[in-house]
């Protein structure tokens, strides 16, 4: 069962200079379904792929509103995410009470990262098994941050975490240079196209398994799901699935040939 | 109070105090005036104590205070500590006048709830994103914003003048003239006021405090010279 003798807690180093418990926690993030984040000069957008544990169950919520100016998309243990979401909400509401202003996104992310780090350095404690994509807007504009179980955090213009997120990152790496000036609708379409790359074979984006959140300096964090996301999903339908909408494409020819890119329809084997 | 037994100390009475603060919004921002006297009781003890300062990480907030001078100085230390913290975060954001006003109000209310108030009336001014900010808080943590504000005796004697004269979009010259008039009236009628004043400014260029200057005053009224009494010899 145990891979080695150095992985039973967070306060024991392996001779190779690793802390296995933290790495296992990062694995928990990779097993959660994917979450995509990207931002323009005006908007920060997150998109998630929701799972349902059975035909009979509902889909697990993966986007949480933190405050008017902030929301998170998560990958990993939802129970841990809810703890962090509650903490972030509390910090935001306290900040509003004291300063009558929303919190700076990066400052809250630092606090969350510090909180996550504590779990990596104490006996009898474990790291959070969740990664967060934090999308927010403040006096310095829109922001996208990622936090990890290790306590590390980074700011990105576009990032994907969770299962098969590498495919989503590949999509984002190909397109991120155009994001800065895009409209909200275009950003959401890119988010869905990146999210589509993370699908396992045989599944597709539907209004039930997709949720999108967006925020800008003057629009509060808003979640699109079910009916409100259907229109966007129709727009990014694969050509063979249904009549294509106004697909984003790097090809100059607009409507009739909506294939986004030559290669990446790749049938990935399940990771 | 257990002052000599080494128990907890608190301000039960203010000791060295500053007087009124008057402030008004004008076309380009906010102007604020206060004299430079720090009185020890009724004694004019210190004559050139500044009672306004550009504060915050970006030095774009102007804080002026009346009441206990040492409590005001401690408040400046709290603000400086917060500014240093923000400087260290280095994310390009800094506390706005509005945020600082709300924060200081929480501080004031918290201290009054501990029965240990900071014995001040403060006036917070700022200018950011094209908007002027002017607000005040007292030692109980009561706060409000307005187009013109006067604390201390000024709340009784300067406010009527401001109500009469203030209008939207005053020029800096008009605003200065109004403040000088308020401070002159206060000097004439408030025994704890002095005629040496400073005027501070919060506008798009940031916050600054001008050099102290003497108010023009007139004492040659006939009754002042020959006295108001029955003797007519200049005495009262």
Image: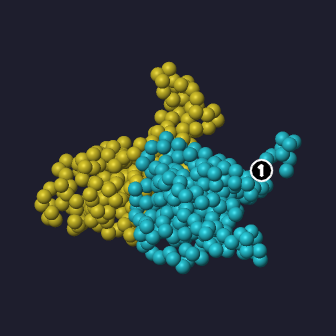
**Vertical placement of A93 versus B92: above or below?**
below
Whole-percent x, y for residue A59 in the image: 47, 60
Residue A196 located left or right of residue A83: left
Residue closest to the eye, B129 or A15: B129
Please tell me which residue is depicted at 55% across the width and 62% down the height of the picture.
B215
Residue A51 located left or right of residue B48: left
Residue closest to the eye, A42 or B134: B134
Whole-percent x, y for residue A34 in the image: 40, 50
Please tell me which residue is depicted at 39% across the width and 45% down the height of the picture.
A155
Q: How many marks?
A: 1
Q: Residue furthest left?
A: A253
Whole-percent x, y for residue A89 in the image: 55, 57
* Residue ID for mark 1: B10
What is the drawing colour of chain A? Answer: yellow
How are the colours assigned in the image?
by chain
Other-residue count near label 1 (Cα within 10 Å), few / some / many at <14 / 14–19 / ≥20: some
What is the drawing colour of chain B? Answer: cyan
Please tell me which residue is depicted at 40% across the width and 51% down the height of the picture.
A144
Please tell me which residue is depicted at 28% across the width and 54% down the height of the picture.
A180
> Taking the image as drawn, is residue B87 in sight?
yes
Q: Quadrant of residue A253?
A: bottom left
Residue closest to the eye, B75 or B17: B17
> Taking the image as drawn, is residue A90 in sight?
no
Disc 1 chain ID: B
Q: Residue furthest bottom?
A: B164
Residue B92 located left or right of residue B229: left
* Quadrant for the C terminus of chain B in the image: bottom right
Q: Quadrant of residue B34?
A: bottom right
Q: Residue furthest top?
A: A15
- Secondary structure type for disc 1: loop
Whole-percent x, y for residue B186 in the image: 63, 67
């Amino acid at each position: 069962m145990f891979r080695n003798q150095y992985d039973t807690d967070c306060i024991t180093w392996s001779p190779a200079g690793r802390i296995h418990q933290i790495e296992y926690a990062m694995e928990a993030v990779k097993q959660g379904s994917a979450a995509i984040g990207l931002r323009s000069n005006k908007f920060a957008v997150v998109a998630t792929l929701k799972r349902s544990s059975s035909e009979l169950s509902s889909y697990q919520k993966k986007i949480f509103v933190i405050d008017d100016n902030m929301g998170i998309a998560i990958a990993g243990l939802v129970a841990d995410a809810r703890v962090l979401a509650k903490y972030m909400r509390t910090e935001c509401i306290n900040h509003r009470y004291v300063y009558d202003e929303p919190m700076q996104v990066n400052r809250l992310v630092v606090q969350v990262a510090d909180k996550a780090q504590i779990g990596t350095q104490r006996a009898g404690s474990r790291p959070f098994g969740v990664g967060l994509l934090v999308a927010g807007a403040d006096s310095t504009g829109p922001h996208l941050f990622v936090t990890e179980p290790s306590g590390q955090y980074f700011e990105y213009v576009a990032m994907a975490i969770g299962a098969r997120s590498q495919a989503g990152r590949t999509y984002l790496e190909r397109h991120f240079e155009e994001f800065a000036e895009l409209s909200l609708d275009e950003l959401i379409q890119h988010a869905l196209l990146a999210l589509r790359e993370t699908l396992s074979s045989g599944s597709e984006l539907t209004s039930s398994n997709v949720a999108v959140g967006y925020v800008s300096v003057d629009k509060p964090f808003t979640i699109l799901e079910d009916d409100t996301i259907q229109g966007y999903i129709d727009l990014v339908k694969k050509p063979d699935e249904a009549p294509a909408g106004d697909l984003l494409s790097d090809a100059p020819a607009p409507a009739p040939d909506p294939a986004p890119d030559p290669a990446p329809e790749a049938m990935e084997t399940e990771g | 109070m257990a002052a000599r037994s080494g128990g907890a100390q608190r301000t039960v009475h203010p000791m060295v105090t500053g007087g009124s603060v008057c402030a008004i919004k004008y076309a380009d921002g906010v102007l604020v005036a206060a004299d430079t006297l720090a009185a020890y009781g009724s004694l004019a003890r210190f004559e050139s104590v500044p009672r306004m300062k550009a504060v915050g990480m970006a030095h774009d907030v102007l804080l002026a205070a009346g009441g206990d001078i040492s409590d005001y100085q401690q408040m400046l230390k709290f603000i400086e500590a917060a500014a240093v913290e923000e400087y260290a975060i280095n994310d390009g954001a800094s506390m706005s006048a509005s945020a600082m006003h709300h924060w200081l109000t929480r501080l004031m209310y918290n201290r009054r709830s501990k029965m240990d108030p900071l014995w001040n009336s403060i006036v917070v001014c700022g200018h950011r994103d094209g908007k002027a900010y002017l607000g005040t808080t007292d030692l109980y943590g009561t706060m409000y914003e307005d187009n013109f504000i006067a604390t201390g005796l000024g709340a009784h004697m300067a406010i009527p003048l401001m109500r009469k004269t203030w209008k939207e979009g005053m020029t800096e010259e008009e605003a200065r003239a109004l403040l000088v008039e308020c401070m002159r009236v206060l000097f004439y009628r408030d025994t704890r006021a002095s005629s040496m004043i400073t005027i501070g400014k919060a506008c798009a260029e940031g916050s600054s405090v001008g050099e102290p200057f003497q108010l023009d005053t007139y004492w040659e009224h006939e009754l002042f010279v020959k006295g108001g009494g029955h003797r007519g010899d200049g005495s009262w």
